[in-house]
Amino acid sequence: MATTGPQGAQGTTPMETGRFRQRRRTRAAIVDATAELVRSGVTPSVGDIADAADVSRRTVYAYFPTLEQLLLDATLGLLAQTPVDDAIDSADVGDDAAERVAAMIRALGAMSTETLPLGRSLIRLTVDAPRPADGGTPIRGYRRIGWIEHALEPLRESLEDAAFERLVSALAMVVGWEALIVLQDLRGLGEEEQLDVSLWAARALIGAALDDARSASPE
């Protein structure tokens, strides 16, 4: 039930178009270039990264105020990108979005011992960072949002655009480092309990979104 009209092509929302879309591509290009340099054994400078990404140093700093933040982001991408992508795609049996999301959560949980300390550091570097001038550009987590959108792809035709975006936002609250930190620090849960709670919360949110869509459908 994706809508059409002022928002653009079917299934396209304002958050996926124009300036926001371009900024997301630019940020990904910078991180990918950094990851390639790190993978090759180089500890890159901002100048090295700008050259590799074909952007200016000023552009790099616009997205990543410090080199430490960028290197952390790229390292996390090297650790997590392929395993999580593969987990989502391997779970794609019968276009079951809930199982795709569950596979993503399990893959992230399996790497949490290695990635969570880096995630805590990245949060520390970004939580007090100045907000972007446009006010709406995320300062971290774009990779996670991409995974969630990918996992939920089977639901794009079942949910209105606004409902789909709301579900992405809701799942962003229960998937990732912030959620794991809450479950560890506030609830004192072990890894298996953290996984169980995250899976339960994700299923509940997906179920609620589908229930809302069914309720809104004409008889």
Image: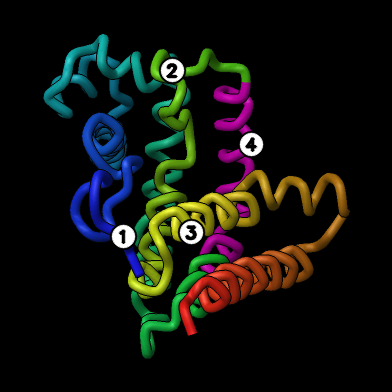
Residue at 50% of width from left, 17% of height from top? 131
> Which label's residue is closer to the chain start, 1 or 3?
1
| Eye-nearest disc, 3 or 4 | 3
Residue denoted by label 1: 3
Q: Quadrant of residue 26?
A: top left
- Tell me the amino acid under the disc marked 1: Thr
On residue 163, which mark appears? 3
Residue 120 image label = 4
Question: 153 or 47: which is nearer to us?
Answer: 153
Q: Which mark is residue 132?
A: 2
Determine whether the residue tagged by mark 3 lies in a helix, strand or loop: helix
The x and y percentages for residue 168 are 49, 55
Front residue of 68 and 85? 85
Q: For label 1, count other residues whose C-alpha is less than 10 Å away and answer few (under 14), some (14-19) or many (20+).
A: some
Binning the other alpha carbons within 10 Å of mark 3 as few (below 14), some (14 to 19) or many (20 upward) gives some
Rendered-image quadrant of the N terminus: bottom left
Q: How far apart are the two marked residues, 4 and 1, measured between alpha carbons?
A: 38 Å
Q: Secondary structure at mark 1?
A: loop
Residue plotted at (27% across, 52% down): 12
- Mark closer to the chain start, 3 or 2: 2
For the residues labelled 3 and 2, the Cα–Cα distance comes to: 26 Å
Q: Residue furthest top?
A: 58
User: Disc 1 or disc 3, which is closer to the eye?
Assistant: 1
Q: Nearer the viewer, mark 3 or mark 2?
A: 3
